Image (spheres, rainbow, N blue to C red):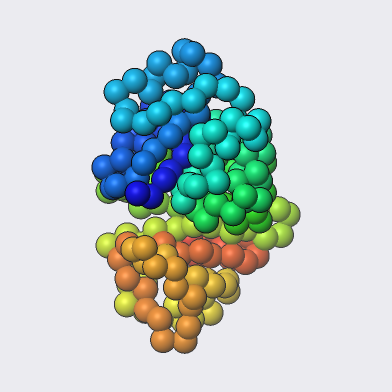
Amino acid sequence: MRKALVIGINDISIVVARLLVSNGYDVSMIASNENEAKLGRGVPAYVYIGNSRNESILRNAGIDESEVVVLSMDDESNLEVARIAKSRGVPTIIALVGNKEKYLDAFIELGVYAIPIVDAVLSKIAHYLKLPFKQLLYSDDKVQAYYVVISSESPYINQEVRDVARRCGVAIPLIIRGEDVIISDEELRIESGDKLFIVGASDFVVKCVEKIY
């Protein structure tokens, strides 16, 4: 049976643990104290109690046999344990990130699947309310980068990405379509629901984003 380790017990990680169990994983969890461990009652998983930064605790909980490690603690603890999991050859490491501005790049550089909690919540809210969704990812004095979800009313649907980028004076290097990440090419056309990464000079990006979604 495949093994998974969930570190940090809270409402989110409990749901994740149950999802893993229902998909055939043998799940262990690590709680930092007795009160946290009580939250895990009802989950068909063995709960260890201790400091997750301690490698002996991690070994006892089965990190060396785990195919998946899910991290749901504070960002600093998540990052430290992610480094340990990476060094021990865990193939899939997923971290929930609270402060993406401070920590997201560090997780990505480490090769960890990082999920900013705020982004996930906003994305769901936008989906349920059927709102167009855009988010500023990076900004300085000259450059901005936006993540934009194309609405069904966008005037750019079915237009080639290269033509839209040229008219806007920006770069659109990739599109997320469903579960696929697509590198933009000359013939790629925009579809409703596409998630575009738009980057360029600040003034041009802002104008493009306002028109494109």
User: Quick check: 32 above or below 191?
Assistant: above
Q: Position of residue 96 (x, y in %)?
A: 51, 40
Q: Quadrant of the C terminus?
A: bottom left
Q: Position of residue 117 (x, y in %)?
A: 48, 39
Q: Residue furthest right?
A: 141
Is any part of residue 70 visible from this angle? no
Q: Position of residue 152 (x, y in %)?
A: 27, 62
Q: Work out whether residue 43 or residue 169 is closer to the camera in this orientation and state it.
A: 43
Q: Residue furthest top?
A: 35
Q: Work out whether residue 70 or residue 164 is closer to the camera in this orientation and state it.
A: 70
Is any part of residue 192 visible from this angle? yes
User: Quick check: 170 above or below 132?
Assistant: below
- Answer left or right for 138 relative to 91: right
Q: Name the residue: 53% across, 65% down.
A: 198
Q: Name the residue: 44% across, 19% down.
A: 37
- Answer left or right for 195 relative to 82: left
* Image quadrant in which you'd find residue 125: top left
- Answer left or right for 213 relative to 171: left
How many badges with numbers are in the image? 0
User: Quick check: 39 above or below 167?
Assistant: above
Q: Name the residue: 70% across, 53% down.
A: 140
Q: Work out whether residue 159 or residue 54 is closer to the camera in this orientation and state it.
A: 54
Q: Name the residue: 61% across, 25% down.
A: 51
Q: Residue furthest bottom?
A: 186
Q: Position of residue 135 (x, y in %)?
A: 49, 50
